[in-house]
Structure formats: structure tokens, C-alpha cells
Amino acid sequence: MSIKGRNTFTWPLMLFLPLFVVIPAKSKETKLYYMNENCQSKIMLHREAIRLDLYRGGYPYAGFGCNTSVEATLVSVNRLVTTFRRMDTVSSVIGICSDASSRLDIYDGPYYHTGLPLTGIYGLCGKNVPKRSYHTFTNYMTFGFKTGSSSHQSFEAVITPYHEGQCFKDEYKCSNGYCVASYLRCDGYNNCGDNSDEKNCKFLLTIGAIIGIVVGCIAFIAIIIGFVVCCCCCPWCCSCEYQSI
């Protein structure tokens, strides 16, 4: 003769346990584009930011040249700002970037060689990441890259649509007066151009995190209420059954 105890009070908890599983919200991913896949073409943006790199798969061949335009399509968000996270191209010996080495130019407009480049008469090259930002007065920004080298080269630019003036409710007001989409705040990228959207982010809760906390609290309360109701209505739920064998 043996006594086997079976504790049955745990099943109410199992009933409500799925409510306690909260899937964390994921912020919008900043999509990555490559110039060699968008040569002589246009990338259209609404309010989302993108990243632009030089070449997917291997490295550019000697004599490689490519122009890629980016367009901000919304009338209310009609300018573009670019910052750099990485610059790893062939350096010029004399300090002037050239087609013989490598040269990246950025223009304010839909075409290559639209007026003077935003990057100056010397262009960008080398391995020093530009500290400044580049912004347009139109809703177009065009990138042009040429190289005479076949070595590995890359860069990473972050391109963000913005506008000035009064920000909308779903926008973030940068310290420089730019208005960008609020979900770009604290996403790890310098979307404002002055990096003000990435400051004081340590204790900032995203909307997804707040929703997760609220849902978790509601689920916990539901578990407690369910357990109490079960114990009051069905006393056997909270007791142990003993079965003789």
C-alpha cells in the first residue's frame, strides 16, 4: 500500500501561462541598399531611412563607375540628410580624391553633376569617416562613385528624409530643427545629422517596450484572478488528491 499525492492546483496557472508570454516588439529595420545593384536608378523613400553601401559581393572592378539617386516622395517631408558610419575606399596620395584612385560625390538634385557637389570639389575618399552631415534643399540626392582600383572598397551612408518647421505628432524634433519620423529615435543611426536623436537613449522606453510591460502586467493580474476564482468555485483545484494504490 502506498500513498501517491497529485497536486492539481497548478492547472489554473498553466491555463493562463500563454498570456504571460510577451513577444518583444522589433523596431523598424533600416534597409541596406548597394550602389552596384542600383546603378543609373532611383531609390524612393517615404519617411523611412535607408543605408547605402557601395558593392555587394566581392569588390568593384577597376574603372567601376555608378550613379544612384534617392528621392523623398512625400510633399511634407521633402529633403534628405546623409551621415556616414564607415568609409573604406582607396586614398589619394595628394589629398585630392580622383577617378584614378577613388572618389565619391554627393549632389543636391536628381542627376549626377547637378551643380556643385555637396561633398566639395575634392570629393570623398580614404578611410576617414566624414564627421559632418550632408543635406539637400530639394527632395533628391544623387551619389556618384568612380574608382580606378580593383581593391576591396566600401562605405556606409545613412540617408534620412526630413523637413523643417513644425513637426507632426509622429515626428521627432532634432536639435538642429529637423523633423524626422519618431520611430527613428534611438535606433542606433544618426538620422538627424547632429546625432541628437541618439542622445539620452539609455532609459528611453520604446512604444513596443511599453506595450510589452502593460501586456505582461495584465497577464499577471489575469493569472492571479483566475487562480483565486478557481479556488473559490472549485475547492478541489487548490487541494491535493490522494489515491490509494
Image: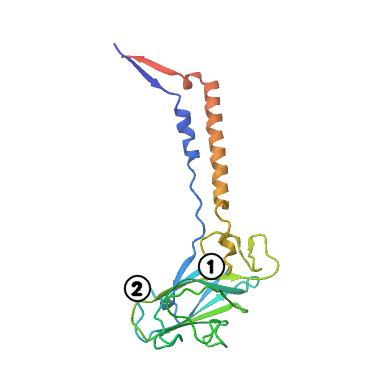
**How far apart are labels 1 and 2 at the CA level?**
23 Å
Residue pictured at 37% horizontal, 18% vertical: 5
Q: Which of 244 and 61 is in front in this view?
A: 61
The residue at the far top in this view is: 1
Residue 4: where, in percent of width, then height?
34, 17
Q: In this view, does 147 lie above or below 178?
A: below
> Which corner quadrant of the image does residue 201 belong to?
bottom right
- How many numbered discs? 2
Q: In which quarter of the image is the N terminus?
A: top left
> Which corner quadrant of the image does residue 74 belong to?
bottom right
* Label 2 crowd (10 A; few <14 / some 14-19 / many >=20): few
Residue 95: where, in percent of width, then height?
45, 85
Tell whether 5 sits left or right of 215: left
Q: Mark 1 points at which residue?
A: 49
Q: Earlier in the sequence, mark 1 or mark 2?
A: 1
Residue 241: where, in percent of width, then height?
41, 17
Q: Mark 2 points at which residue?
A: 57
Q: Quadrant of the C terminus?
A: top left
The residue at the far left in this view is: 1
